[in-house]
Image (spheres, rainbow, N blue to C red):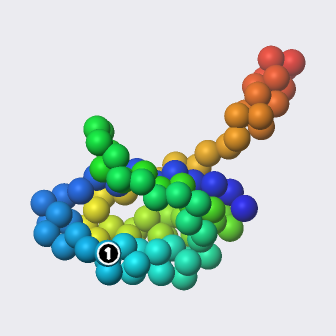
Amino acid sequence: MPIFMMFGKYTTQAMQNISPERTEKAVEVIKANGGKVISMYAVMGRHDLVFTLDFPDAENAFATSVALNTLTGIAFTTSPVVEVELFDKLIAKVKNI
């Protein structure tokens, strides 16, 4: 299944409702959309949260991003990723064109 990174930024509203229970609900939303949590990190800097998630397709990833925003008030940006090994193979094909 494709891997997606979700980058979250807290809003003022989202900060008011931080709790372990909300995190559990977020994981339930991910699973309900066919996703699997690979990692979830709180980070400092441009983003407040970084999730690595496995989904069956982009549609499920996007639906989850919207659902998590609705649930938490956290603004998420969702990006598909590929492993570096596959990236290198794709780039090699481009050079041969």
Residue 58, compared with residue 29, is above or below; it is above
Q: Work out which residue is located at the far right of the displayed protein and give it.
A: 96
Q: Work out which residue is located at the far front of the displayed protein and give it.
A: 20
Q: Residue at x 28, y 62 (%)?
A: 74
Residue 10, compared with residue 31, is above or below; it is above
Give the structural element (helix, strand or loop) at label 1: helix
Crowdedness near tag 1: few (<14), some (14–19) or many (≥20) residues, C-alpha within 10 Å? few
Residue 68: quadrant of the picture: bottom left
Residue 88: quadrant of the picture: top right
Q: Residue at x 77, y 34 (%)?
A: 85
Please provide percent x and percent y for residue 13.
14, 66
Residue 1: in sight, yes or no? yes
Residue 90: in sight, yes or no? no
Q: Which residue is mark 1?
A: 20
Q: Residue at x 19, y 58 (%)?
A: 11
Q: Nearer the viewer, residue 63 or 34?
A: 34
Please provide percent x and percent y for residue 57.
66, 64
Q: What amino acid type is highlighted by mark number 1?
A: Pro
